[in-house]
Image (tube, coloured by chain):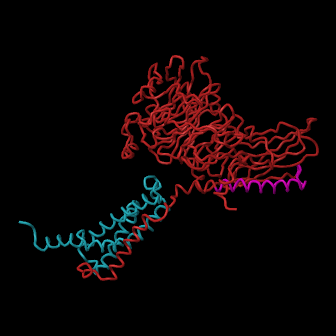
Amino acid sequence: MEAFFVFLFIFFPGVAASVYYLKIKKKTLASVEFPAFIVVFSFLIFLCNLAFQYFRGFSHQEVFNQGFFSIQYTGKYLFLSLIFSLLLPHVVCLLSYFDVSFDKFFSRFREARKSGPKK
Amino acid sequence: MGFLQKMSFPQLVKSVLALFFLVFLFFSGSQVVSEDEMVPIWNIRSLIQQIQVQGQKEAFLLEEISSGGYSWENPLVVLDPYGVSPLSALIFFSSEQPIRVSLQLPGKNGGQDVVFSSNAFSEEHLLPVFGLFPGETNHLLLQGISQSGEKWEKEIQIPTESLSGKLENLLLSVSQGDPSRIQEGFNFLFEDDPKVAFDENGEIRWVLALPTLQPVLYDTRNGKKWFCTGNYHFGDVIIWEVSLLGRISRVYYSPYGVHHDFAFLENGNLVLLGSENGPTIEDLVYEIDVDTGEIVFELDMKTVLDPAREAPGSFPRDWLHLNALEVVSGENSLILSARHQSALIKMGYPSGEIEWILGFPEGWDNSLASKLLTPTGDDFEWPFTQHSPQILPDWDRKPNTMDLMVFDNGYGRFHRHFDEREEKKLLENPWREYSRVVHYRVDEQERTVEQVWQFGKGDLELFSDSRGDGNVLENGNVLSAFNVSNRPYTGVFLEIAPESNEVVWQVEWGNDVYCIERLPLYGSFDAVFSLGDPVDNFIPEEVIGKYVQE
């Protein structure tokens, strides 16, 4: 049950954001970067949630208390995560045209895989 | 532009808008009020509304009573007349001649009876009924006696509803030995949720459904009960007197919050622990004039102690963590419990002069180190992160000594520099920490302290890293509350016979616990009752306006 909540909390918004990002970039879900995007977006959304609570005082105390998994907190977290999973893919999309490009980063892996193991 | 060639214009617009919206989300407008901050607002609002509702309910009751239709044969019985105390009732009737009335509610399973007798002969009788059993029809025995000695007796049936929600599953287990060794009375718990009193069998017999802080139920010698509602730290707080029936009679206001305790000074004023609006919390002692409701004195403890001293649990913002105070009778001084300095401090009041410090000796600056008490005797241990000191009567009949009962949490006893990251380890108790109820004797002339008695040492199951209580009862037993750490939401209440350290009564409770008091249901304040008296309300109009929209 707890694992399900962790998934819901951390990875589900990341999965949603990754699917949306790939849609914006007109790539299929079969893309090799998909799992990596899930991890990256999950982390970014979690970070944004913490930052939001820090800057706006939104349930800031509950994060560190036993009330972390209260129904209210879960609801608020998921609502915020939904907003972030819609915004962040667009922001990442914008960033991807600068040198902090994910695509560029992952393309190195693709090229490395194509060229085979180092000798 | 190469930039635009890579990205379509609509997508560029979307991305830029998303970025702006993200920044806007973080930095626009004021802070969103968190749930933690909303709770005091909701609670103060509902308390102020309750005072208004109370007036309306009393007006209705007075109108009903004045209809004149209620007699010994046909009394008016109102269960929970104020809507906040579901196991209490009010009985009214008139008699043709002056009679004295008593009522009796028999206990169950060998439990004590609830008995109340009015003191005076009267023709009008307004009787509060406390201690009803939940979820059943209570058979109350009403007796009347005339001045000539003529007696009447009748049974009144009062059905009550079952307890629901959290109240249903609070009692986990109860065990008791010889009932004659247990101090009579009901066990009042000072939690914010729920506020209850239960009998020796663990059955809940009183509930107060009004929002409060914890623990701050203060029972005065005449049985007056006081609670606080609002903020622990800097912020609005309402301090109010209430009867067990739920009738609020006096109300005060403070902007400094109340952190866990207050008391009455010998001049009748209230002295409270709170926080200023500053970088630190829980380090303010302040006084409210009970005749005007004004704050007449404030003492910032940073000016009398050393905020830089490190002790278990302390951090710059909460360096002191005052959690209890006791007024020393006949002296202008207070005993303060400073959890995050692991020290009990006797301080002149209002002078702020430190008289002595009962605490482990490391880290005090030179001026304060000279105030430390020197331990004497065998088996002495300092208190760590303690709670709930109680000044005992003159135990040894020596005027220069003071006896104190303290709940020594022992958190940090073996690791003085506690780190939040070690929370999980603490629950496993790798340091084999233990909590104790300790009786210390301070020789104020010799400036020494000895340990007279203790209970709990070495019992890891009872380790309570925060909160707890220990009180000496009338029969000499010690009633204690252990907020056990290794089982979440569980407390253990023990009545201990100190001569043998034998546990004569034990209750396991399915909730966090803090303070416990063994009190009679009928204090003199609760027994004398009148309807329609005005509430002494010292909350400023602007504060009421802030919380309640007309």
Relative image position of residue B249 (x, y in whole percent): 73, 46
Answer whether residue A75 is magenta in the image. Answer: no
Outermost residue to the front? B1
Q: Is residue B46 visible?
A: yes
Depicted B324 relative to depicted B476: above or below = below
Q: Nearer the viewer, residue B198 or B438?
A: B438
Q: Quadrant of the C terminus of chain B?
A: bottom right
Q: Residue A17 sits in which quadrant?
A: bottom left
Image side of residue A14 versus residue B79, left or right = left
Q: How many marks?
A: 0
Q: Quadrant of the N terminus of chain B?
A: bottom left
Depicted A112 relative to depicted B34: above or below = below
Residue at 89% x, 48% y: name it: B94
Image side of residue A42 versus residue A64, left or right = left
Relative image position of residue B21 (x, y in whole percent): 41, 71
Q: Nearer the viewer, residue A47 or B423?
A: A47
Residue at 13% x, 70% y: name it: A112
Image side of residue B301 versus residue B159, left or right = left
Depicted B548 relative to depicted B14: above or below = above
Answer whether residue B60 is magenta in the image. Answer: yes
Q: Nearer the viewer, residue B171 or B307?
A: B307
In terms of secondary structure, what is the magenta stretch mainly?
Answer: helix
The stretch in magenta equals: B45-73
Q: Which chain is cyan?
A: A
Residue at 66% x, 42% y: name it: B294
Q: Nearer the viewer, residue B406 or B75?
A: B406
Q: Is residue B494 visible?
A: no
Q: Which chain is red?
A: B
Relative image position of residue B202 (x, y in whole percent): 61, 44
